Image (spheres, grey):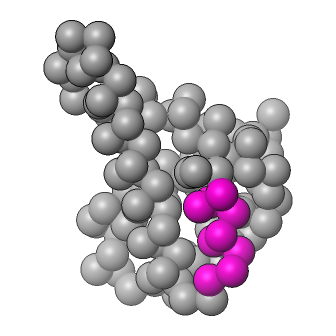
Amino acid sequence: KSINSLKSILNSNYPIGRLRLLSNILEKTTEEMSKIASSHGKNVAVGAEDLAPVIDYIVAKSQIVDELDFVFKSLEPLVPNVFWSGKFGYALTVFTISVGSMKNS
């Protein structure tokens, strides 16, 4: 489901809508990872280092790495500074790092 959600970013023309989509994917992925840990009797906080391989998987399976790279780079000048310190900025950073690592490998 997250893979299809990520692909839908190409259908959105609004920068804040694209950031919201990334944030929602990140939030749902974090929730699912927490549920899985809980089902094994563990109560853990999911951090960036835990999310990285899962986000890498979502990005890779989306098969739109080049398109995502362009979208993410085009978002930077369009997004007001107020969004960079919150959850939208965090989501964009996580996904941008993932795309960057795939383009450099």
Identify the residue at the far top of this view. Answer: 41
Q: For the view shown, which residue lies furthest in the left direction?
A: 43
Which image quadrant: the C terminus?
top right
Q: Is residue 100 visible?
A: no
For image coordinates 65% across by 70% down, the residue present is 8
| Up-down relation of residue 54 to residue 88 (above or below) | above
Displayed quadrant of residue 72: bottom right
100 and 59: which is toward the camera: 59
Q: Position of residue 98 (x, y in %)?
A: 62, 44
Residue 48 left/right relative to 52: left
Q: Is residue 48 above or below residue 71?
A: above
Q: Nearer the viewer, residue 89 or 9?
A: 9
Residue 1 seen in the figure: yes
Q: Does 5 appear in magenta?
A: yes
The residue under the point 49% across, 49% down is: 94
Within the image, what quadrant is residue 102 found in?
top right
Q: Which residues are magenta?
A: 4-12
- Residue 50: x %, y % from top left: 41, 27
Looking at the picture, how far across and down is residue 49, in whole percent?
A: 42, 28
Residue 46 left/right relative to 19: left
Check residue 47 for magenta coloring. no
Identity of the residue drawn at 56% across and 51% down: 2
Task: Work out whether residue 71 or residue 105 is closer to the camera in this orientation and state it.
Answer: 71
Q: Principal SS element in the magenta part?
A: helix
